[in-house]
């Protein structure tokens, strides 16, 4: 399963793993939200609220697509955050890992706080 995350100056595609959270997310697509930044992490509110269905962690690789339960948001770190110790991507609290963007996570530096972000499903060819 893949999703496209687009904004005025760019886009990325992310491959998501199978999970209850992923399936519920796909049913809300397409949707728009406002980008927010926390250090080198972009996050945006989802039009749904749910519990984590997988193991959670607070340190991930750049470009990891995460579901932040208490924030009701998708979060994608692309570098250090204010909570990081050195170069790691440390989120504010544990998150569910949903997948990873395809390509370089650094493209997310082009997103600015307040940008409108659209999330849509990528239709896979048969």
Image: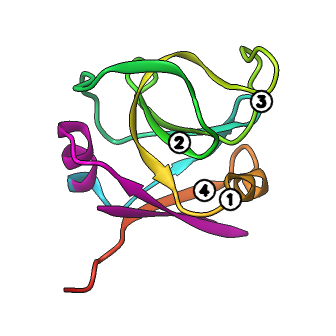
Q: Is residue 34 left or right of residue 38?
A: left
CA separation in Å, label 2 and label 4: 20 Å
Residue found at x 48% / y 50%? 100
Residue found at x 76% / y 29%? 80
Q: Is residue 88 magenta?
A: no
Q: Assign the C terminus to one quadrant of the image.
A: bottom left
CA separation in Å, label 1 and label 2: 11 Å
Q: Quadrant of residue 124?
A: bottom left
Q: Are marks 3 and 2 in contact (CB under 8 Å)?
A: no
Along the viewing direction, whichever of 100 and 35 lies nearer the viewer: 100
Closer to the eye: label 2 or 4? 2
Marked residue nearer the N-terminal end (3 or 1): 3
Provide the residue span drawn in magenta: 1-26
Q: Which residue is mark 4?
A: 116
Q: Is residue 73 above or below residue 28?
A: above
Marked residue nearer the N-terminal end (4 or 1): 1
- Label 4 crowding class (10 Å Cα cut-off): few <14, some 14-19, many 20+? some
Image coordinates of residue 91 in percent, x first then y, are: 60, 21
Closer to the eye: label 3 or 4? 3
On the question of residue 90 being in view, the answer is yes
On the question of residue 8 being in view, the answer is no
Number of the label disc, if any, that sits on residue 39: 3
Q: Which residue is mark 2?
A: 64
Residue found at x 72% / y 14%? 83
């Amino acid at each position: 399963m893949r999703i496209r995350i687009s904004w005025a100056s760019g886009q990325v595609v992310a491959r998501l793993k199978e999970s209850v959270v992923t399936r519920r997310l796909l049913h809300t697509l397409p949707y728009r939200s406002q980008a927010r930044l926390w250090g080198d992490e972009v996050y945006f509110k989802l039009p749904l609220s749910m519990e984590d269905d997988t193991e959670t962690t607070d340190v991930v690789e750049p470009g990891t697509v995460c579901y932040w339960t208490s924030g009701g948001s998708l979060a994608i770190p692309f570098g250090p955050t204010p909570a990081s110790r050195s170069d790691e991507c440390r989120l504010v609290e544990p998150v569910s890992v949903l997948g990873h963007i395809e390509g370089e996570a650094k493209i997310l530096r082009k997103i600015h706080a307040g940008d409108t972000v659209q999330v849509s499903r990528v239709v896979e060819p048969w």
